[in-house]
Each structure stands twice: as C-alpha cells, then as structure tokens.
Amino acid sequence: MGQAEFYQTIEQTATTEFKDRGSRFIAHTYPLQTVNDFKIILQQLKKEHPKAVHHCFAYRLGNEGNIFRVSDDGEPSGTAGKPMLGQIDSKGLTNVLVIVVRYFGGTLLGVPGLINAYKTAAAMALQLSPVVQKPVTVRWQITFAYTQMSEVMRWVKAFNCIVKEQDMQLFCKLIIDVPRSRMNELKTLFDDMQQVEITTVAVT
C-alpha cells in the first residue's frame, strides 16, 4: 500500500452541548496545525470557562495522523480523552482538536455514563464540522537566482504548491508545501534548471 495522497480534516470550529443528569458537557472542535496552537486554544478556553471542573481534550495531528494526545483532566482514566479521540478516528480525521468542558451537575455519572457523555459530545460537535479533503504535502526550501524567479514561481503555481515563506533578493529563498502526488514530477523539473537547490524541511 502506497502513502496516502490526501487527508481528511475540518476547517471550521464548532460548539455544541450535551447534558446528562445536570452535568453539562460543552464540546468544541478546532482545525489544528501545531501543538503550540493547541496550547494557546486550551489556555483561552480555560479563561472562558474558569468555573468548569474539567477541560478534557483529544487531538490528532500530521499528514499521517501519527501525532496524538488525550487528556482526562481529572476524570477517571480512559473516560474522556480516549472516547473523544475515538470519534476523531471514526471519521478518519487529522489536524483536529476536540475539547470538552464539563460543568458538574451534582450527580455522579459513573464510568459508563462519562464515556457516553464525552463520546456523544465529541460526536455531536464533529457532526457540525464539515469535513474537507486536503493534499498531503511535503515542505521544501528552494534556493535560486533572482533571474529564475518567474520560471520557478510559474511551476510553484502550476503544481498547486503553497508558499509559506519567501525571501526575494539576489539569491532567492522559498519555503513551499508541495503536494506529495506531484513531488517527483516537480523535482525533475527543478533538477533540470541550473542553480536551483531543493532541501526538505521538517514541519514543526
């Protein structure tokens, strides 16, 4: 089996609420690019809900979906983060964060009740987040002479690459995300051009 050329994610945030015996479970979904973005979002949400007893989360990141983390934030182990991640995975999504904020309603729900509540809240919020398909990309740094700019930019555009950074001086530097499906084709074109150098950059 070859490597996937597309991945499924969301582009919009969504919020929904699930109630069970007085407890409120407010679920938020976010498109996520980096672990650092996650930390900022979580801090912001804690400020918005200072009286909530738990801020549980699950996220999956990366083109391959191989970076993930879950937290039960004080709930019994395995009752919150894991069921939430299960909902992300059942939709085959990556670059997605789900946070569920819980306000305790005075009645203990027990382990099955908690699993059901966090799973249902996450599922409801993800249901409201339209799924989009995006190409799996590889990040390149390209250096070339200023005189080659128009030709290089023409190919960058033709191959649907996304320019992340550019520094245009006598010697130019571009950081671009290249669709993996077009990578070999584009590399061959650039290899045929004098003075164009490509290096692969790790995405943090």
Image: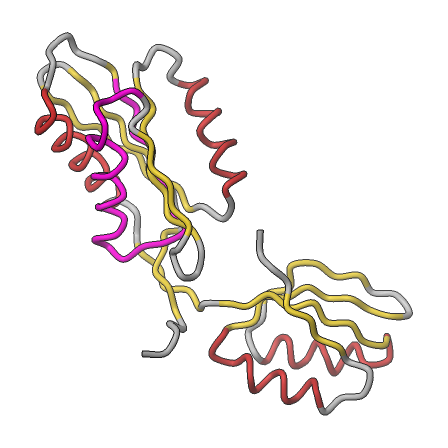
**Location of residue 18 in the rendering, given as x and y in whole percent from the top left corner:** 17, 28
The colour scheme is secondary structure
Residue 121 position by quadrant: top left
In the displayed structure, does residue 133 sit left or right of residue 38?
left
Q: Is residue 180 above or below residue 27?
A: below
Q: What range is drawn magenta here?
A: 74-102
**Location of residue 135 in the rendering, given as x and y in whole percent from the top left corner:** 44, 68
Residue 102 position by quadrant: top left
Looking at the image, which residue is at 42% across and 64% down? 134
3 in magenta? no
Residue 117 visible (yes or no): yes
In the displayed structure, does residue 66 sit left or right of residue 163?
left
Choose between 55 and 134: the one closer to the eye.
55
Pick the quarter of the image with the N terminus: bottom left
Q: Is residue 34 above or below residue 139?
A: above
Residue at the extreme front of the image, as rendered: 77
Looking at the image, which residue is at 63% across and 83% down? 187
**Location of residue 154 in the rendering, given as x and y in whole percent from the top left corner:** 68, 80
**Location of residue 55 in the rendering, given as x and y in whole percent from the top left corner:** 34, 24
In the displayed structure, does residue 67 sit left or right of residue 27?
right
Residue at the extreme right of the image, as rendered: 170
Looking at the image, which residue is at 15% across and 7% down? 106
Residue 29 visible (yes or no): no
Looking at the image, which residue is at 30% across and 47% down? 129
Q: Is residue 130 above or below residue 16?
A: below
Choose between 195 and 163: the one closer to the eye.
195
In the displayed structure, does residue 144 sit left or right of residue 82?
right
78 in magenta? yes
